[in-house]
Amino acid sequence: MFGCTWAGDGALLGNVQNVTGQGGSLGEGLSYDYLYNQGPDSYVDYINANGGTILFKSQDALNRAISCDGPSNNYRAIHSTFIFGALRDGSKNKDELMATYMDYVLSAPGVAETTQDYVRDVMLGPSPFTHTTNLRFTLTQSSHVTIRIYNSVGQFVRELIDARLNQGSHQFLWNGDDDVGQNLSSGTYIVRLEINETVINQTIVLMK
């Protein structure tokens, strides 16, 4: 499923000092330091590509992250054996890497194919945004619509609407606050649009 196979346990400590993105992958041109010889560096597995693409190698040239388009290019998956939160910002910050990951994962062709019955012309932007961003879409028929926003680790932060809407064009603004009106910090967020049984996920970057 993840396009990789297990190749080893790693050591008790001293596994990952830094990781480097591999050419031709989502990680190309990216590099990050790691919490070397600290807790997250305990028994970091290394893996080999098995139908997937190597994203990152550690300083010892061992594969630590792999992406996969599925056996028939029908889904997206990323398997990383290092802990994302233990990365230290390098050539790009971690928010940018997470945005790259989410754009890749949520671009699976199966998602777009399910949107034709109820909705079209889905647009979200600007991104990055500082003050407000706008989600626009057109319903082909009257439908129940839910719009929820989650942070980069999947925690719910805001609901924009949960109601039935008429056929036609609609737009919703989000100003970067949570459900109780508090300003959220800079980072990558997931906007989840549910229309009947159709689900569309898009990422947005908030920069304060």
Image (cartoon, helix red, strand yellow):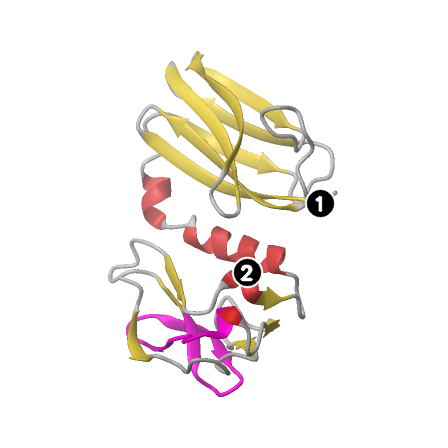
Q: Residue at x 69, y 33 (%)?
A: 183
Q: Is residue 75 above or below residue 35?
A: above
Q: Which residues are magenta?
A: 40-65
Depth order, front residue of 173/185 = 185
Residue 130 as seen in the image, left or right of residue 117: right
Q: Is residue 85 visible from the viewing direction of this image?
A: yes
Which residue bears the numbered disc 1?
Answer: 207
For the point 41% across and 69% down, the residue is 81
Relative to residue 96, is residue 131 depicted above or below? above
- Give whichever of discs 1 and 2 has the lower sequence position: 2
> Where does residue 47 sit, x and y in percent of width and height?
35, 77
Mark 1 and 2 residues: CB-CB less than 8 Å, in contact?
no
Task: Quadrant for the C terminus, please.
Answer: top right
How many other residues sit within 10 Å of disc 2, few (<14), some (14-19) or many (≥20)?
A: few
On the image, the x and y values in percent for residue 24 come to: 49, 74
Q: Secondary structure at mark 2?
A: helix
Residue at image mark 2: 85
Q: Position of residue 122 (x, y in %)?
A: 49, 33
Q: Amino acid at mark 2?
A: Gly
Residue at 48% across / 80% down in the picture? 13
Q: On the picture, is 141 further left or further right than 149? A: left
Mark whose residue sits in front, 1 or 2: 2
Q: Which residue corresponds to the image point at 57% horizontal and 23% vertical from the top-left?
A: 171
